Amino acid sequence: MDMTSDKDQLLTNLFAEASRTELPDNGFSRRVMRSLPTRPERLLRLWSMFCLVVGVVLLVAIGFWRHMMTFAVELTRAFVNAQMPSAEMLVWPVLLAVAIGFVVNEMTMRMES
Amino acid sequence: MLSDLNDTLLIARVVALGDKRAFDQLVRRHQSRVRRFFLAQTLGDGQLADDLAQDTFVKAYMGLSHFRGLSSFATWLMSIACRVLYDHTRRTRFTADIDSLSPGSERSFTPDTALRIDLYDALARLRPVERACISLQLIDGLPIERIAEVMSLPEGTVKSHLKRGKDKLSDYLVNNGYDKR
């Protein structure tokens, strides 16, 4: 008799009961459901996207890019002349940095979820 | 096949509509299999098995939108269970040798039969990866190719683990009076 099939038969017989055992739920599913984190709602995602689009449109409408170009020129002159750029010039880059940070944070949170 | 289709419909409801009741049905449908798997891996520790099973379902819920349907939901779920087990083993350096078992170990879900105790003692002699392969085959009845898919191992490696595991199990059980025939 083949030793391997003998072993297999022995183990199959011994584990037969375990393989048939169905564990009663006993509240397990309820505990799982209570522990689930909140998934981001679809509506919230759509709202975030809408706000992002409106924000971009507003930035274009108020000539944001013109201001950025002006800032870039000022910054270059400042480096050349070893001078700090004016405070007014810093507003738009700061706003841009904040907006980028917000978008990156949102995308990171969505990826993690 | 019908159960796979039902699982797919439930998954679609969870992902598209955020329907948590659909996920509850998935949990109820698959909880026994997952908990049974972890019971074998934890050698009958019901509390730990439930904690690991709960972790598995939470991870499945969070990653449900990544389920592509290339395999059945049950297979996908069991592959998550294997990763949860692997992470737990690494964290706790879980070494299931006979010395770590004590008469007071909680074995909540099983009748206190001599066979059940002997099977857990036998499983304790296996390496975690051998124990996982053995339980997936002998308790869940999965074919080798499915075990390989669940554990992300080559089929040849699974066969090696199964052979070594079965040799250790049968040697222990035969030495403890369980007849070969």
Image (cartoon, grey):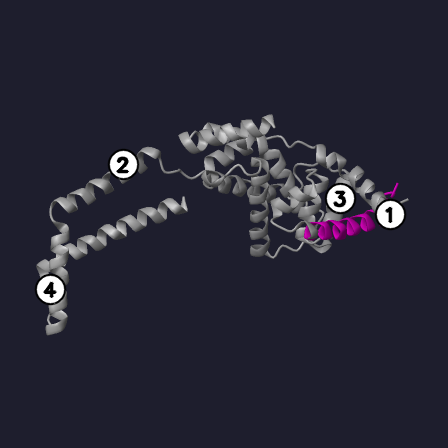
Sequence order check: which comes first, mark 4 or mark 2?
2
Q: Residues within 10 Å of mark 2 (few under 14, many from 20)?
A: few
- Horizontal side of A26 relative to A39 (left or right) equals right
Can residue B28 be seen at all in this image of the molecule? yes
Query: Dot 3 corresponds to which residue?
Result: B119
Q: Nearer the viewer, residue B47 or B168?
A: B168
Q: Choose top left, top right, bottom left or bottom right for residue A67.
A: bottom left
- Residue B146 horizontal/vertical position (percent): 65, 42
Q: CA distance from mark 4 to mark 2?
A: 36 Å
- Horizontal side of B178 relative to B132 (left or right) equals right
- Residue B71 horizontal/vertical position (percent): 57, 38
Q: CA distance from mark 4 to mark 1?
A: 86 Å
Is disc 4 in the same subunit as disc 1?
A: yes
Bounds of the magenta segment? B157-181
Query: Dot 2 corresponds to which residue?
Result: A47
Dot 3 falls on a residue whose secondary structure is helix
Q: Is residue B168 magenta?
A: yes
Amino acid at the residue labelled 2: Trp
Would you place residue B109 above or below residue B131 in this image? above
